Image (cartoon, rainbow, N blue to C red):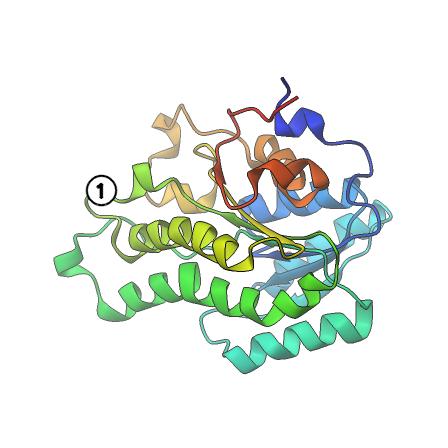
Amino acid sequence: MKTAASAVAPGCLGGRVVLVVGAAGGLGEAASLACAAAGASLVLLGRRVPKLNRLHDRLQKAGAAPALYPLDLEGATPDDHAELAARIEAELGRLDGILHVAAAFEGLTPLELTDPATFARALHVNLTARWWLTQACLPLLRRSGDGSVVFAIDDPARTTGAYWGGYGLAQAGLSALVGMLQAELGDAPVRVSGLLPPPMRTPLRAKAHVEAEDHVARSPLEVAAHCVALLSPAGAPHRGQLWSPGEVLPA
């Protein structure tokens, strides 16, 4: 038996183009660095241009200069996502993987007191926009021969209780989307999986937990290898499944 992370071979993403959605976030940055180290050509999508530029410079110094695509998922339309797919095809010629790690969370609030706009934004950024972008890119992924879509999902077991609001509902929706989309894709050369990372020490988690007392949270760097695993051929056994990093893959 072996874990997915240990099954990842050096250069396992070589020759592949990977789109990291939410690249400027805690897990996004760590995963981008890990994907580049595994040989991927990256397209980094995010709304914070200064952070994207800093990540670009860091990767460039390591010899893996990525393409940047500033985009705010909250305001992006289906046409904007279609334009993204068209530009990736025109400039890079292919797309082999999408890693969805962008998230919007404003903190724990009773549903009764939640601002309607905040509720709608949480559902849109965390669920609807992820699907719109994926839908626009599916034709490109089909042509890859081994396309992969990985959704980072905050475990619904933790986030469907009281006060998680639209964010928690979106995580439950993403969990359903993984199985539903894979069932529809069938044996198409595109696989869909969900990554249920452990609690991570990120700005998003800090909105719900006091960092000084949060002794279970782990560094996103520990989770980045699992993102690579699911994007690589080693992730094939998790087609249509939700996976927690503590689990193992068949030997």
Q: In the rendered image, which quarter contains the C terminus?
A: top right
Query: With respect to residue 195, does 176 lie above or below?
Result: below
Helix, strand or loop status at disc 1? loop
Q: Quick check: 228 left or right of 198? A: right
The amino acid beneath tag 1 is Gly
Q: Quadrant of the N terminus?
A: top right
Identify which residue is drawn at 81% across, 68% down. 93
Point out the residue furthest to the right here.
63
Nearest the viewer among 52 and 1 is 1
On the image, which quarter does residue 67 sit in? bottom right
Point 81% across, 67% down: residue: 92
Q: Position of residue 238 (x, y in %)?
A: 56, 39
What residue appears at the point 48 percent right and 32 percent down from the top-left corner?
244
Residue 70 point in image, percent of width and height = 62, 69
Identify the residue shown where x is 57% and y is 34%: 223
Identify residue for label 1.
161
Tell me where residue 177 appears, x and y as whole percent: 43, 55
Vertical arrangement, residue 112 with respect to residue 224, above or below:
below
